[in-house]
Image (cartoon, rainbow, N blue to C red):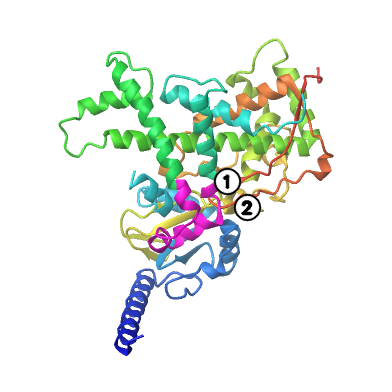
């Protein structure tokens, strides 16, 4: 190679390194008063994290650096909140300042800133999905509908990829990784197909819209679009409608179905707990009517089991990221506006003082000495504060009705010995994914 070319490449390389180091030093200065592991130039703290289990890594770091510390994902500083007290103080007491939507690079890139033993995954995915379909489309689908099956496949694949180690790498280095091959490209493709499916349904609604008789979320959105059509900065646009519906599907379908699936796995693992639920169902509901929401107040043990399922599975361990809406004095630190926040739900759901032996699945965590249901401020699988999950009420209703209806009509049986059932998640990134398993639903035999 020509010596001048070598010199030119060397010069470009040196200048690039200087720019990167300068950016790194500048970013460190933004939150220099906060404790945390020393980051390396460009790559930050990625070498100190297990990308297969980020939440566990963050909990280990909190033992060293305390409940509020800084972590560098690439060159960007992230503020991590660990433990109930600091979470409550930030998300509730300082709710306004911590209410900003945090950065999740791969989602930002997608949304552009917008009888025989069988695996129950399919059936438990279809039912919650149809609940969301009825709210959004005013329609439910048959389980053999090809378009519905394709929708289910897209949603399932989306969660798998989001929970993979590769997605964590993307979120650390979005500017670099977006140009590389990897599973993120399949995610973008799948999400575009999901958006196309939604757009098709949206256009069908547009043709049949009756402004005086809205049937679902899409109709209501269209009416608001018409009301604000002359408003230049209106957020009620066709594009925002598609991304909003996509977000609702992602948040309202896979979270509930995964909780149901993980819950059934735990009930197979602990048949003595399942027997107690059967006894309570027989006593309170019986076999002559279907369960209803008012039954929950009379079923403390069942309610405690469902709460413990949500606590134990720790479905979205690192929460959805927040950001600080303005320069904020928090404890002894000054947090600059725009700082990304990770409110670590694991640190609250697995607090060993509030929940003794937190690694043990125990409904007693939510029962008092008399067997009555015991509330806990530490129960926050839906997060807390101003950015608490908007679908919490719907999810809580679904979980109670699905679990009680299944156990009212069926006895659960595992093809393998309960002692041999492994409940360890197969992925623990954005969300935790339970292992595949098979289950027998036998006609009810507990009366």
Depicted 401 relative to depicted 58: above or below: above
Would you name the residue on which mark 2 appears? 351
Q: Residues within 10 Å of mark 2 (few under 14, many from 20)?
A: some
Residue placed furthest toward the top: 288
Which one is in front, 378 or 382?
A: 382
Q: Which mark is residue 367?
A: none
Q: Nearer the viewer, residue 404 or 214?
A: 214
- In the image, what residue occupies the spot 77% across and 27% down? 116
Which residues, given as a range, are shown in magenta? Answer: 161-187
Task: Give how far across and how far down residue 318 sits, in percent.
Answer: 52, 52
Secondary structure under tag 1 reads loop
Magenta includes 166?
Answer: yes
What percent of the width, then of the height, locates residue 129? 52, 29
- Give the dominant element type of the magenta stretch: helix, strand or loop: helix
Residue in the picture at 55% in, 28% down: 128
Q: Residue furthest front?
A: 1
Figure quadrant of the C terminus: top right
Residue 17 can be seen in this image = yes
Residue 349 location, x and y as percent? 60, 48
Q: Residue furthest bottom?
A: 3
Q: Name the one closer to the observer, 350 or 112.
A: 112
Instruction: State which tag comes first along the sequence, 1 or 2.
Output: 2
Residue name at image x 50 percent, y 44 percent: 383
The image quarter in which residue 156 lies: top right
333 w.r.t. 200: above or below: below
User: Relative to residue 235, is residue 446 drawn left or right?
Assistant: right
Is residue 381 shown in magenta?
Answer: no
Residue 219 seen in render: no
Residue 378 image label: 1
Q: Are marks 1 and 2 in contact (CB under 8 Å)?
A: yes
Q: What distance separates the C-alpha of mark 1 from that of mark 2? A: 8 Å
Q: Residues within 10 Å of mark 1 (few under 14, many from 20)?
A: many
């Amino acid at each position: 190679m020509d010596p001048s070319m070598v010199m030119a490449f060397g010069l470009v390389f040196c200048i690039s390194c200087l720019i990167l180091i300068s950016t790194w030093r500048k970013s460190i200065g933004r939150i220099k008063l906060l404790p945390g592991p020393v980051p390396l130039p460009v790559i930050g703290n990625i070498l100190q994290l297990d990308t297969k289990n980020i939440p566990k890594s963050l909990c280990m770091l909190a033992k060293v650096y305390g409940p509020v510390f800084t972590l560098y994902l690439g060159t960007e500083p992230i503020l991590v909140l660990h433990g109930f007290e600091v979470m409550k103080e930030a998300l509730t007491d300082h709710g306004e300042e911590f209410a900003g939507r945090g950065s999740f690079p791969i989602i930002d890139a997608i949304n552009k800133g917008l009888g025989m033993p069988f695996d129950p995954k399919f059936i438990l995915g279809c039912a919650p999905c149809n609940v969301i379909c009825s709210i959004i489309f005013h329609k439910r689908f048959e389980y053999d509908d090809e378009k519905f099956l394709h929708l289910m496949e897209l949603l399932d694949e989306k969660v798998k990829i989001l929970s993979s180690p590769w997605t964590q790498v993307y979120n650390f280095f979005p500017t670099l990784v977006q140009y590389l091959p990897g599973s993120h490209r399949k995610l973008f493709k799948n999400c575009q197909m999901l958006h196309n499916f939604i757009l098709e349904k949206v256009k069908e609604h547009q043709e049949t819209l009756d402004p005086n008789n809205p049937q679902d979320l899409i109709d209501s959105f269209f009416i608001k679009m018409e009301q604000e059509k002359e408003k230049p900065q209106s957020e009620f646009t066709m594009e925002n409608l598609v991304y909003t519906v996509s977000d609702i599907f992602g948040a309202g379908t896979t979270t509930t179905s995964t909780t149901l699936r993980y819950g059934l796995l735990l009930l197979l693992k602990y048949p003595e707990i399942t027997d107690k639920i059967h006894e309570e169902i027989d006593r309170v509901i019986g076999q002559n009517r279907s369960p209803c929401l008012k039954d929950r107040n009379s079923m403390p043990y069942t309610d405690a089991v469902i709460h413990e399922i949500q606590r134990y599975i720790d479905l979205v361990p690192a929460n959805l990221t927040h950001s600080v809406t303005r320069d904020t004095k928090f404890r002894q630190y000054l947090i600059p506006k725009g700082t990304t926040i990770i409110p670590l739900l694991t640190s609250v759901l697995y607090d060993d003082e509030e929940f003794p032996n937190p690694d043990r699945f125990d409904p007693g965590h939510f029962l008092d000495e008399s067997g009555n249901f015991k509330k806990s401020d530490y129960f926050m699988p839906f997060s807390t504060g101003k950015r608490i999950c908007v679908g919490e009420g719907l999810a809580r209703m679904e979980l109670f009705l699905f679990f009680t209806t299944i156990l009212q009509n069926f006895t659960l049986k595992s093809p393998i010995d309960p002692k041999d059932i492994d409940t360890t998640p197969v992925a623990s990134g954005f969300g935790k994914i339970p292992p595949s398993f098979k289950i027998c639903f036998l006609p009810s035999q507990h009366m």
